[in-house]
Amino acid sequence: AEIHFHEFVVQATPVKRLCSSNNIITVNGQFPGPTLEVRDGDTLVIKVINSARYNVTLHWHGIRQLRTPWADGPEYVTQCPIQPGGSYTYRFTIENQDGTLWWHAHSRWLRATVYGALIIYPKLGVPYPFTKPNKEIPILLGEWWNRDIISVLRQAQFTGAAPNVSDAYTINGQPGDLYKCSSKETAKFFVKFGDKVLLRVINAALNQELFFTVANHMLTVVGNDAAYNKLFTTRVIMLGPGQTTNVLLSADQPAGRYYMATRAYATAQNAPFDNTTATAILEYDSVPCTAKTGLAPRPLLPPLPAFNDTPTVTAFTSQIRSLAMQNGQVPTQIDENLFFTVGLGLINCMPGPRCQGPNNTRFAASMNNVSFVLPRRTSLLQAYYQNIPGIYTTDFPPVPPVIFDYTGNVSRALWQPRKATKLYKLKFGSRVQIVLQDTAIVTTEDHPIHLHGYHFYVVGQGFGNFNPNRDTVRFNLIDPPVRNTINVPVGGWAVIRFVADNPGVWLMHCHIDSHLTWGLAMSLLVENGPGELQSFEAPPPDLPPC
Ligand code: C2O
């Protein structure tokens, strides 16, 4: 195993998109940020130097951080932010994981531009469990705002209204041909006939689930969130923010140029969304030029599903089955049976500039009616480790405080969540099941729920209200998908299972940043186990001061 050292300088960088220049926050001046390439078993040492004028932290999305919770990164959860002029070195080892993950800022909305791919190859000598590709391409889907992202966030926070939607989607940082002033820089990938290409697709968008497809080419899905699946083919994939999907593409079409395209999957009723399409070009090296112009023919634009095409999403996700699983790998006995609602809410306010949500309200969101508030004086992990009182309580409700028809007509009395910093405590080694249930409060909506420090088995999902008598018997305990981010279906539910074998404080949240800002989050506190190998260490000396 190797140790990889990197220096990441967080800085303001002028970047031109959609005809105008914007000073965005980048790592090392790159947008998207640098790609990290490692092998399973390797150690990463990344010194982050903050040369920007905002506080920042970085998160290694999907890395389990076994016994290294101080390196996880969400601000005020596992560390206080790195202040301008400060630095912090993240050190962690990849343990039994390979595939596509990514890294991103975990500080307000800076991840809009501060993100990059984290590619983990199998251990030396271990082959992929599918036809060896002769080319690999990371595909980072993102969103672009013409305005400074912190001002977009502040506007939403000040007014209490929904945030402005993005001005473009991007593929590897570029909106592509269908936007003005963007043609020249469109991302282009060259292939030759017969190539087997592994596309490592990452949804790094801030607030939007996205469809992705390639004209004329079928996609063979081989993995999701750094876990292999049984192969299946599809024309289109859908990723929630935070998710990754690896697909194999055979370059078996007539020489030509083909668009890759991405567009919104938007499920919130009557909510505006960015309805544009970002493209990149897959170009065969022998592409004929038209005799007259000397220009290559226009690429073919693939059909994309309608923005609200949930059946296509269900058809895709229901095919994902884990590749290899040993008997008994999925917990069948459960010690902690939890049920969390995930959904929006509204908080009443006095009419005025700070009260621009619907009918004299501000937007909010919650799990089990608790709208999560980050502490400010210190991080949750430090408060736990140093026994600092008054930062959090451990009374997060294991089930909703009120049982109601979650996806039906919810009484207005249940629309107002309470703001608090509540954790749920788990004994080391406990076998946990969490039912994640969408609600119809304000609107039903697809929520990509991400759990830090773990990957989990998705043993079931469906629409409507979860019904234990009907739904438990249909759970897949044989080859359920393994993920770190699960899309709770719009107006539906998903059930995850895992063993709480990684001590620390782990944020669980909707990966749509507007929902996270509104409070759609909670934290699990997993206590240290009995032995040294089941406990985490003291904080590193350079952990940023609060
Ligand atoms: Cu990818 Cu808490 O985030």
Image (spheres, rainbow, N blue to C red):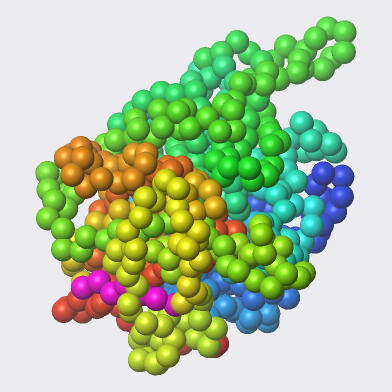
Q: Does residue 30 lie above or below 387 as drawn? A: above
Residue that sits furthest to the top in the current view: 291
Chain part drawn in magenta: 421-427
For the point 72% across and 43% down, the residue is 168
For the point 49% across and 23% down, the residue is 235
Left or right position of 268 against 245: right
Q: Does residue 212 lie above or below 363 as drawn? A: above
The percent position of residue 163, horizontal first and vertical second, equals: 69, 57
The percent position of residue 343, horizontal first and vertical second, equals: 47, 56
**Viewer-side residue, 406 vs 478:** 406
Could you tell me if residue 195 is visible in this image? yes
Left or right position of 292 against 328: right
* The N terminus, quarter of image: bottom left
**Viewer-side residue, 198 vs 106:** 106
Give yes or no for residue 423 being in the magenta stretch.
Answer: yes
Q: Does residue 393 lie above or below 184 as drawn? A: below
* The C terminus, quarter of image: bottom right
Left or right position of 301 against 432: right
Could you tell me if residue 542 is visible in this image? no
Q: Does residue 168 lie above or below 399 as drawn? A: above
For the point 59% across and 28% down, the residue is 306
For the point 33% across and 79% down, the residue is 394
The percent position of residue 172, horizontal first and vertical second, equals: 64, 43
The percent position of residue 282, horizontal first and vertical second, equals: 63, 26
